[in-house]
């Protein structure tokens, strides 16, 4: 292990705004502070001498701002509206990455990551390095999701899989990579679980613990894992927080890209990258060059060769979060997100009892929006009636009914001779997070719910939430 004196010298150098010394690796020197592993002895001495004039209070103040911005995505851009990449000897020698996009960019970058450092460690051995890489200014441990100026006792922290263990990180490979594992307060680690990062009720917002900059830090860690371990461990990014853990996905991609732009790399990230580099680990290229993310992904997945072009087709629909939005005759469709897919209510239904409305898979929701060109989707409008609403589609009204032991739904009044308590009037409510509840005003209340790859009516509310989407 390198002497901690070098780490302290780097801290003092940052606080005193000493100019960065160029690394022999030269990873985007305009965006990062070079590693002490690459500094000459004369530079190290000079930095230490200069730091001797920095007071303890001024050192701490340099960590206190939640906007310790040291890099940002440039405003100038190339022909396909992507940020211009700088050329350096490590990540982009002679512009080798300039013409690459999407998966080809990721593949090339992954090999370059490995070339910057070959050291590995076990999951149990991570603290040997986290003690230094995540040291707070007061000599304690800086918990992830907290500002760089905050410290906590090591005993109150455990190891947080920023890319969750259950979503493919495991306890080796990405699961023992100090770029992917961060110290976190034990209580906060468990509260996040294995959720995607994002702003919906199904996701976890790193800023919910008080430090907004954690959003950018989380994004760049996820980008690193999805790049370095794409081939070896099958990790990938998407926008579906309901995806099965077996798919080894993380996101939400669209939100992470936005956070990477909005919350630039801070000094703590740079120092951490350099300390791990000193130990012999690979570097995180998205800390050195946050623009790389734009060349690999767009909001929907891998970026195409043509650059900033939306690869999805179909019409865009937004999740409705207030029933008043639907009272002006606006048409909408009903969808449900189960563990593996997004299903929409269609016009197909069974001619026999129990009646039900079959579902069709459409595009995955992205931050409350979906794109669809599925012609069989059933669109509805609300008509106020009897203290509730009638649900009308081109096929007719939606009914809830009881037929012996069956409590189900159908288009228009049920024709079964045994069907009773039919009603085409529904109580319609939408929660603030968009959850849609539909209950027929029948003698025996019937809820519209998702069940067994179809939409069925039952006496109880379904366990899989429904949502309304309007153009």
Image: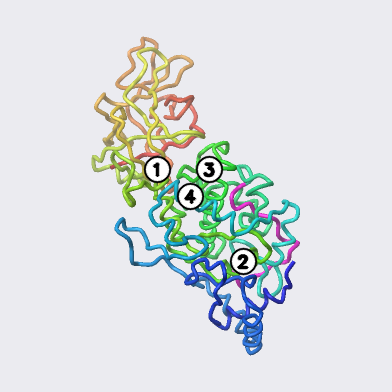
Residue closest to the far bottom: 53
3D distance between C-alphas at marks 4 and 1: 41 Å
**Which quarter of the rendering shows the N terminus?**
bottom right
Instruction: Looking at the image, tell me whether mark 1 or mark 3 is earlier in sequence order.
Output: 3
* Residue 416 left/right relative to 93: left
> How many numbered marks does the figure carry?
4
**Mark 3 Cα within 10 Å, few/some/many (few <14, many 20+)?**
many
Instruction: Looking at the image, tell me whether mark 3 or mark 2 is earlier in sequence order.
Output: 3
Contact between labelled residues 2 and 1, with CB atoms less than 8 Å apart: no
Q: Is mark 2 on a helix, strand or loop?
A: helix
Q: Which mark is residue 73?
A: none
Residue picked out by circle 1? 430
**Mark 2 Cα within 10 Å, few/some/many (few <14, many 20+)?**
many
Q: Residue 272 carries which label?
A: 2
**Which quarter of the rendering shows the C terminus?**
top left
Q: Which is more toward the observer, 68 or 190?
A: 68
Instruction: Looking at the image, tell me whether mark 3 or mark 4 is earlier in sequence order.
Output: 4
Q: What element carries label 4?
A: helix
- The mark lying in front, picked from 4 and 1, is 4
Residue 314: in magenta span: no
Instruction: Tell me which segment is drawn in magenta.
Output: 148-164
Above or below — where is 199 with respect to 274? above
Residue picked out by circle 4? 106
3D distance between C-alphas at marks 3 and 2: 25 Å
x, y percent for residue 311? 33, 43
* Residue 196 left/right relative to 397: right
Residue picked out by circle 3? 249
Residue 156: in magenta span: yes
3D distance between C-alphas at marks 3 and 4: 16 Å
3D distance between C-alphas at marks 1 and 3: 29 Å
Contact between labelled residues 4 and 3, with CB atoms less than 8 Å apart: no
């Amino acid at each position: 292990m390198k002497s901690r004196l070098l780490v302290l010298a780097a801290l003092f150098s940052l606080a005193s705004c000493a100019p960065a010394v160029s690394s022999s690796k030269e990873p985007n020197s305009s965006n990062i502070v070079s590693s002490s592993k690459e500094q000459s002895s004369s530079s190290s001495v000079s930095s230490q001498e200069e730091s001797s004039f920095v007071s303890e209070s001024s050192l701490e103040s340099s960590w206190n701002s939640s906007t310790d911005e040291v890099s940002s995505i440039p405003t100038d851009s190339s022909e396909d509206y992507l940020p211009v990449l700088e050329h350096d000897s490590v990540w982009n020698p002679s512009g080798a990455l300039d013409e690459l996009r999407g998966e080809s960019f990721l593949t090339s970058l992954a090999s370059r990551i490995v070339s910057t450092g070959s050291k590995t460690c076990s999951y149990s051995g991570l603290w040997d390095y986290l003690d230094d890489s995540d040291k707070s200014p007061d000599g304690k441990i800086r918990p992830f999701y907290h500002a760089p100026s905050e410290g906590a006792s090591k005993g109150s922290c455990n190891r947080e899989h920023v890319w969750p263990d259950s979503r493919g990180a495991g306890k080796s490979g990405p699961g023992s990579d100090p770029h992917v594992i961060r110290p976190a307060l034990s209580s906060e680690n468990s509260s996040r679980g294995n959720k995607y990062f994002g702003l919906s009720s199904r996701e976890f917002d790193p800023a919910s613990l008080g430090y907004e900059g954690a959003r950018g830090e989380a994004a760049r860690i996820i980008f690193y894992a999805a790049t370095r371990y794409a081939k070896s461990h099958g990790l990938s990014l998407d926008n579906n927080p309901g995806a099965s853990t077996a798919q080894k996905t993380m996101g939400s991609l669209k939100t992470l890209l936005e956070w990477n732009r909005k919350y630039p790399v801070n000094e703590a990230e740079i120092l951490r990258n350099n300390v791990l580099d000193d130990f012999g680990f690979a570097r995180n290229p998205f800390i050195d060059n946050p623009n790389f993310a734009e060349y690999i992904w767009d909001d929907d997945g891998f970026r195409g060769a043509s650059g900033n072009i939306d690869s999805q087709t179909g019409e865009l629909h937004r999740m409705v979060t207030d029933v008043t939005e639907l009272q002006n005759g606006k048409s909408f469709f009903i969808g449900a997100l189960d563990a593996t897919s997004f299903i929409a209510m269609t016009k197909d239904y069974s001619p026999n009892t129990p009646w039900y409305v079959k579902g069709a898979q459409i595009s995955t929701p992205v931050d409350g929006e979906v794109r669809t060109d599925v012609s069989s989707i059933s669109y509805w409008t609300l008509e106020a009636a009897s203290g509730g609403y009638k649900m009308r589609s081109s096929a007719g009204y939606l009914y809830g009914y009881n037929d012996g032991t069956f409590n189900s739904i159908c288009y228009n009044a049920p024709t079964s001779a045994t069907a009773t308590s039919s009603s085409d009037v529904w109580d319609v409510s939408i929660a603030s997070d968009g959850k849609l509840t539909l209950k027929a005003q029948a003698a025996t209340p019937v809820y519209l719910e998702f069940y067994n790859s179809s939409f069925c009516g039952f006496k109880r509310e379904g366990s899989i939430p429904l949502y309304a989407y309007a153009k």
